[in-house]
Image (cartoon, rainbow, N blue to C red):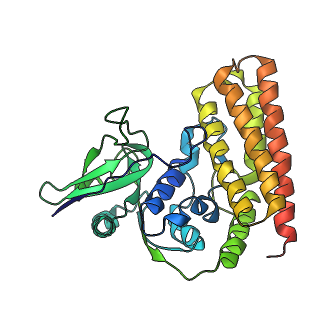
């Protein structure tokens, strides 16, 4: 059997072009499901609009060092139902079992018209599996760095990937999430859960070997204050762009649900990150004055997110 969905990144809000690949893939999958009204909210209600991880050397891999198997409960906080199949390092004995289970889930999801969210699609980032062909044992995928077949078209070039290499590519970890339905969670319950997820992450409650949550701010600020080489690197642009784009989803969600104080705080946070990103991409970050401005903007965002945590905790939800 063969089936291929017509899926595009178009319409997924990405203020910097660096939106975290899992969040972008998740939003796109939901947008192409039977519940597109959740496509923007889910980035916040799964907690990803609030998540930050920063390594001392600004390695982009810092954005993929967290508990992948928490994807299901985090996304289900947002009112959706999911299936998840994963395998970590040093679990070779279950590699085939988990890969075959993931393949079944992917095909079932595509048969329902929804792309599957998978790790290491094209590059070691999240992307989408958009089709399959049993005759040649091949998936059709939409990597996060996919290019358009024609600049005037909304269609992207698809990349083929053999069934057998799922979870065994450059970074041999299996992580496949599929959207299967909608739960009966109320908007109030979703909001309550979102605030709990946000506070837990921002206060360091989620596993990660690198600086995380609010502690990511001093780690990133230190780079701009003390390391001109790292500050001027593409890696610094990646981190500013990745987290800056996520902040927009936080403020828009709070605005949508009527949490005006939090919406205003996160709009200020978003604007600070965006200004820092703009400076980094347009000016020479080896210059002390440029780095000082970026650090100052990040400090402003840091103080605002600290205040946001206090507000969320005060709600006693």
Q: Residue placed at 56% from the left, 52% from the top?
A: 65
Can the viewer see residue 50 in this picture? no
Residue 9: x %, y % from top left: 44, 47
Residue 250: x %, y % from top left: 69, 56
Can the viewer see residue 11 in this picture? yes
Residue 143, quarter of picture: top left
Q: Quadrant of the N terminus?
A: bottom left
Residue 199, quarter of picture: bottom right
Residue 288 higher or lower than 312, as above or below: above
In this view, which residue lies farthest toward the front? 152
Question: Between 103 and 5, which is closer to the camera in this rendering?
Answer: 5
Residue 97: x %, y % from top left: 29, 69
Q: Residue placed at 54% from the left, 54% from the top?
A: 23
In this view, which residue lies farthest toward the left? 135
Q: Residue placed at 37% from the left, 60% from the top?
A: 115
Q: How many marks?
A: 0
Residue 179: x %, y % from top left: 43, 69
Please indicate whether residue 83 sits to the left or right of residue 282 in the image: left
Please indicate whether residue 59 sits to the left or right of residue 174 in the image: right
Please indicate whether residue 296 sits to the left or right of residue 31 in the image: right
Q: Residue placed at 77% from the left, 60% from the top?
A: 203
Q: Quadrant of the C terminus?
A: bottom right
């Amino acid at each position: 059997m063969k089936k291929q969905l017509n899926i595009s990144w178009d319409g997924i809000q990405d203020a910097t072009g660096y939106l975290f690949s899992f969040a972008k893939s998740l939003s796109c999958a939901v947008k192409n499901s039977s519940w597109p009204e959740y496509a923007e909210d889910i980035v916040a209600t799964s907690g990803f609009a609030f998540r930050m991880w920063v390594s001392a050397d600004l390695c982009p891999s810092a954005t993929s060092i967290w508990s992948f198997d928490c994807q299901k409960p985090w996304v289900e906080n947002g009112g959706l139902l999911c299936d998840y199949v994963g395998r970590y390092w040093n679990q070779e004995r279950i590699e085939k079992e988990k890969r075959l289970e993931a393949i079944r889930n992917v095909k079932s999801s595509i048969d329902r018209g929804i792309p599957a969210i998978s790790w290491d699609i094209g590059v070691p980032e999240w992307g989408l599996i958009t089709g399959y062909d049993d005759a040649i044992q091949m998936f059709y995928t939409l990597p996060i760095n996919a290019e358009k077949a024609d600049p005037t078209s909304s269609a992207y070039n698809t990349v083929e990937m053999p069934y057998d290499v799922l979870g065994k590519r450059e970074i041999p970890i299996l992580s496949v999430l599929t959207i299967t339905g909608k739960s009966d969670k109320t908007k109030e319950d979703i909001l309550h859960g979102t605030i709990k997820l946000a506070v837990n992450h921002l206060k360091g409650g989620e596993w990660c070997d690198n600086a995380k949550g609010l502690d990511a701010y001093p780690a990133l600020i230190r780079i701009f204050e003390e390391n001109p080489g790292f500050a001027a690197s593409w890696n610094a642009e990646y981190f500013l762009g990745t987290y800056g784009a996520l902040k927009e989803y936080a403020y828009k969600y709070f605005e949508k649900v009527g949490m005006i104080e939090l919406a205003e705080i996160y709009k200020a946070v978003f604007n600070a990150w965006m200004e820092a990103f703009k400076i980094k991409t347009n000016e020479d970050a080896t210059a002390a004055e440029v780095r000082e401005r970026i650090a100052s903007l990040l400090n402003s965002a840091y103080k605002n997110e600290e205040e946001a945590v206090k507000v969320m905790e005060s709600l006693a939800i």
